[in-house]
Amino acid sequence: MAHLSKRSTVYFDPAIHQALKVKSATCDQSVSELINEALKLFMREDQEDLQAFTERATEPEMSYEELLSDLKKHGKI
């Protein structure tokens, strides 16, 4: 396990905690390692969403009605 510089107390739903312990035992990783990897993935996804939002900020706006018409026009709905 990598050296962790901070500790924190986290409270889990009992079923989630049990699932973490089982996963930990079956994949030879600590619960802390599993949680750290999950949080890194979660934050990476947020970063990707923010990047996509920034890249699309200059796109023209479309009303909901226009969106529905466009989807229908292209056979999506």
Image: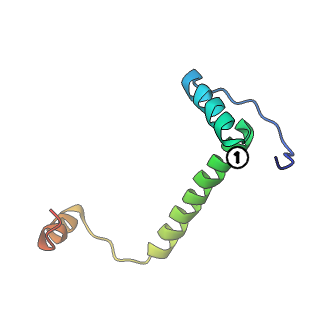
Q: Quadrant of the C terminus?
A: bottom left
Q: Quadrant of residue 7?
A: top right
Which residue lies under the disc numbered 1? 36
Question: Which percent across, then down, holds residue 42?
Answer: 58, 51
70 or 12: nearer the eye?
A: 12
Question: Which percent across, then down, holds residue 59?
Answer: 38, 77
- The amino acid at mark 1 is Asn
Residue shown at the point (23%, 62%) measured from the top left:
64
Residue shown at the point (18%, 66%) measured from the top left:
76
Q: Is residue 13 above or below residue 76?
A: above
Question: Which percent across, then down, holds residue 66?
Answer: 19, 68
Visual colour scheme:
rainbow
Toward the top, the furthest residue is 14
73 or 17: nearer the eye?
A: 17
Question: Which percent across, then down, holds residue 2?
Answer: 83, 50
Q: Count numbered badges in the picture.
A: 1
Q: Quadrant of residue 13?
A: top right
Residue shown at the point (70%, 30%) measured from the top left:
10
Q: Is residue 68 above or below residue 60?
A: above
Which structural element holds mark 1?
helix
**Mark 1 neighbour class, 10 Å CA radius: few under 14, some 14 to 19, many 20 or more:** few
In the shown orientation, is residue 76 left or right of residue 50?
left
Residue shown at the point (87%, 46%) measured from the top left:
5
46 or 56: nearer the eye?
A: 46
72 or 4: nearer the eye?
A: 4
